Image: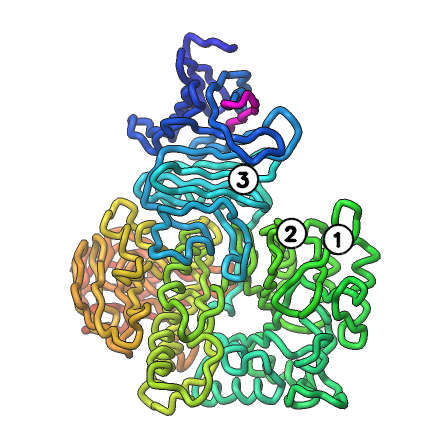
Amino acid sequence: MIRKEAPLQAEGFTVQEEPGRLIIGTAGYFMHIDKQGCCFSFHSPEGRVIAAAHTVSGIRFSSPNEEEVFDAVSASLISIDKHQVCILVSNRNGDQAHIRIEPFSSFVKLQVIPRVEGRYIIDARTAPLQPVYGLGDHGGYGESTNVFGITDDQFFNSNDGKRFVSNFAVFPAAGFAQVLFEDGVKRVRINGEENALGASGVRGVHSLYYFIGDPKQIYLDYKQARHWEGYPDLKPKYDFFEVGYEAFGSLGWNTCQESVTEDVQTYLNKGYRLKWAVIGSGFWKGDRKADDQGATTSFGIWDDVSEEDRTDGLPNPRYPDKEAMKEFFRSRGIKLILGLRISFKALPEDGGHHNALYDGTFIHEGLERGYFVTDERGKPITFRVQFPKGAVYLLDARNDEAVNWYLSLAQLWGADGFKEDTMLKDGALLLNDAKCNGTNAKLMEAGYYSMVRNAAYSVPGEILRLEDTMYGMDQDRPAINGLNYAASGAPNVYADIIAGKYLAIPLTEDQKLYMVRNAMFAFVFPAMSVGLGPWNMNCVHFEDIVKKACDWHSSMAPYLYSAAIDSFHSGYPHTMTPLPIAFPTDTTTYELGCKSKKQYEWMLGPSLLAAPAYGSDYARVTARDVYLPEGKWIDYETGAVFHGPVTLYGYEIPLDKIPVFIGGKGVVVVRDLTDDRLYAEVYPIQQQGSKYVFHYPDGKHSTIITNDNAGWNVETLEIIETESENLVPFRYNAKTGSFSFLIQEGVNYRLLDGK
């Protein structure tokens, strides 16, 4: 044992050994480790308890290849070097493991590796603490955005609803967060007995992180940790933040060239500014009712030649002139997005429905080169998915050559991007939650747009789609799900198609109200799309509301993308910030986002607070309690001014109201939909040095707008170009008190005087 009279100063941290415990110190925290039970806790430099130690044990693990876990009973210091502290821990059954602790200034990395070879169940835990947010899709199906109370020892992609898998959890009140990087079966227990992360069936826990600090520090460190552990983020491109179209919402599975182009053209004729369009299914060859029809991995083989004896009742062929269709979208400035999965129809002898006429010969190349997931003997494993029918092989995402091969094949479709939508039924057989991270990243790097559904920890795409929405489902789930995506560090959330899927015409009155309220919910997400045409409601007023929602989102797309770039650089969820993260010390924010209160609110970029009236009461809600945190807030439409913290009880939110308040930085950049020019709108919120940085749609250039004004008197306030000091003309909005002026790429601006 190493004994020290005084703290040992390693590189960036100190270690002090006392008779009953170890104390590891950094600039940002102290980690106490009790030798009895290996119970560990985190403390601020001032002595505040950040996360208290569990009263029984901090570590527990099984014997090799066994199911029962045993509490740690003792821990002893083995060694210290400039990077890590190594501890030997013994459990109640006599098993031993090494714990390697790598302290950094604002986070710590832990590894727990049993000494004997085998497969283990391993947990690390502190005492309970809450509130807590995040957990990816697993955090989206409860009663509240606060996920406290969860106990899940089978935490992985087990069904379609849980395809974005992340056990990252943030405790904003405590200034604390945690994550365990593991692609297999994870264990999450954040409840009244413990705060535990672990894994089962593993040789060891190699990448457990605890983060300490304010939310911006935590998310910055988490972004760095993701990169270290092989889950990088990629810089988003602009167009997915504009309004899009999904054929699935209008046409379901039965798409064809004529119906898609007619649908899109109708939207354009009615003034909708569509910038991307998804055809998720049916573009491949074959009878839609036949088991051997093509699939998304029938690369480049379109349904462009008629066949005899089809039974699906659809046009034959469905896509007779694919090049004309591509030109249709290209000439209208719309990105063509096709559905894409990593499942390949297996050969008939393996239980699949592969048909060379419909699927090509790619499968043979992949089998010969070992590009599919195999068993220990090298034999391809077959899996079950929602579509196509029969057995399938899965691309081996851990094989770089396989991923590059997949990219070369995806290029054969000639699309601008892809909607990734693998629906695996056999997640327990694969045990790789990151099965699509590599392919999505490779597509992004090649310049394609990527709408992500399956991912682990990071989102290698522009936007992350919620699980399918539809009339009749739990309408609170999209809000809770989306907010916990953002809390998980994935803020570029797409709330799925307006009105979801499977609506049949004629619509009932309840379905019409659902479509309208859903539109006025989806439009304040970073990404949105239309599907079934709102003209099918046969109500001009309702259709006008949907159009208003889409137009507002179109005008705000540059502002939303700028926030997405901030998120990419910082890791902080600027694009969509849950209020407990934006205002971590405000206890009122902690329980707003729940099914009972339905106060689903978030910061949309640095200057807008969204408070949509949505949930299971969509058909009858006309008002909602709205909470405004500390600061000045202005109703976006009425100009009414409020000073937080305050709850606006029964605040009227009629169907057509934009449920947004201006606050925060007080600056937005909007596009004038009549001429496409960009205007800054500066509201009387901040002054005396506050800066807003706007990132242009090219993702490269920026403009800085600085409030150096002492007041907001329209008679004396001036706006100048920072470098040239030239005066800039502006327009004043008396209702909201805002100042609007044209901005130019690369030019910075200052507001002056205003007394």
Would you name the residue on which mark 1 appears? 401
Mark 1 or mark 2: which is in front? 2
Secondary structure at badge 2 equals: helix
Query: Where is 43 relative to 531, above or below?
Result: above
Tell me the quarter of the image containing the C terminus. Answer: bottom left
Q: Verify whether residue 98 appears in magenta.
A: yes
Q: Is residue 376 left or right of residue 111?
A: right
Residue at 53% over, 18% down: 80
Q: Amino acid at mark 3?
A: Ala
Q: Are marks 1 and 2 in contact (CB under 8 Å)?
A: no
Which residue is under mark 3? 199
What is the spatial separation of the Cα atoms under label 1 and label 2, in whole angstroms? 19 Å
Q: Which residue is the site of mark 2?
A: 430
Residue 724: where, in percent of width, then height?
Answer: 37, 60
**Which one is earlier in the sequence, the residue at label 1 or at label 3?**
3
Above-or-below relation of 182 to 728: above
